[in-house]
Amino acid sequence: MKILLSGIKGFMGKEVVKLCNAGVRDGVIAAGVDINADGTEGVPCVKTFAEAPVDVDCIIDFSHFSLTEDLLKFAVKNHLPLVLATTGQTQEQKEAIRQASKEIPLFFAANYSLGVALLIELAKKTAQTFPDADIEIVETHHNRKVDAPSGTALAIFEAIKQVRHRAVSKLGRSGVSKRTPDEIGIHAIRMANIAGIHEVIVGTANQTITLKHEAHSRALFAEGALAAAEFLIKKSPGLYQMNDLIEI
C-alpha cells in the first residue's frame, strides 16, 4: 500500500512513518508533502500538493485544517482515496469534505483510535441491551488538557443517545439532586501525565458492566489511520468513519 503522507514532518506524521517502517498494515511511505520539507525525510518530499506525485494508493493527512481545500482538490482531481486525520475544519470545509466524498472514497474522523471506536460501539450495544440501567461516563486526561469533558466522552454519550433517545447529559455531580432515569453522568479527571482513559459504567440492580479504554501513546492514532487507509482503498466513493471499521 503506497501512501502519500501529508504532514510528514509533524509529530503524527513521524508516527505514521515509524509504523510503516515496522511493516504495519504493509504501508509504504512513497512520498510526503510538508511545508517544512527540507530533504531529510528519507523519501521524496515536496512543499505543496501541486508538486506531489500521484502514483500512490492513498493519501493520509496529518497536517493542518487550513490545507483542507487544497488537499481535497488534489485528491479529487487525481481520484485518490483520502484519509483525513486533521481536525478543526470550519462548517464550510466540512461541507467541502462531504462534496468530495461523492467523487472519492474519503475517511474522516475526529479520533482515529480503533480501541475508542470499539468502546463507543460496545457502549451503544450495552445501553441497548440494558435499557433501564444507570450509565456514567468517566474520562481521565493529563493536567494540561484545557477542555472538559473530552470530545470522546461526548461522542460516547451521543452514541448512547442513538439507542436511548430521551437521554440527557449531566456534567459532574454535586449538591442535592436525585438522579433521574434519563440522565447520563459525564465526569472529567485531570491529573499527572495520563494520555487518556475513558470508562463507561453500566449498572442495574443486579449487575455492573464496566467498559474501559486506556491510551498508552498517541501512536494509536497513526495505527488507526493506517487501518483506515487499508480499508479505504477497497471502497467506492463515499464518506467513511471509524464505526465502519468496527463490526459487532
Image (cartoon, grey):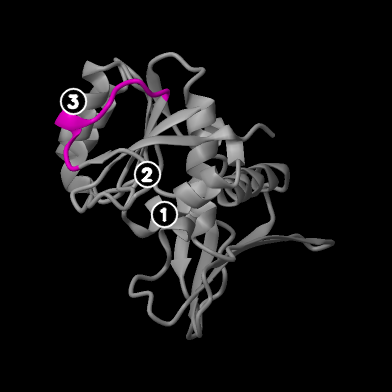
State the image coordinates of residue 187 (x, y, percent, origin top left).
51, 72
Quadrant of residue 94 in the image? top left
State the image coordinates of residue 88 (x, y, percent, origin top left).
25, 51
SS for dot 3: helix
Residue at numbered disc 3: 73
Q: Give the residues in magenta.
A: 47-57
Residue 92 shown in magenta? no
**Image depth: mark 3 or mark 1 in front:** 1
Residue 85's disc number: 2
Which quarter shows the C terminus? top right
Residue 244's disc number: none
Q: Are marks 2 and 1 in contact (CB under 8 Å)?
A: no
Q: Earlier in the sequence, mark 2 or mark 3?
A: 3
Closest to the observer, 226 or 128: 226
Tag 1: amino acid: Lys
Q: Is residue 244 above or below residue 36?
A: above
Q: Is residue 145 left or right of residue 69?
A: right
Q: CA distance from mark 2 to mark 3?
A: 16 Å
Residue at numbered disc 1: 14
Q: CA distance from mark 2 to mark 1?
A: 14 Å
What kind of secondary structure does the magenta stretch mostly adopt?
A: loop
Residue occupying the point 47% across, 78% down: 142
Q: Is residue 123 left or right of residue 103?
A: right
Q: In this figure, what is the number of numbered marks?
A: 3
Tag 2: amino acid: Ala
Residue occupying the point 17% across, 31% down: 51
Tag 3: amino acid: Lys
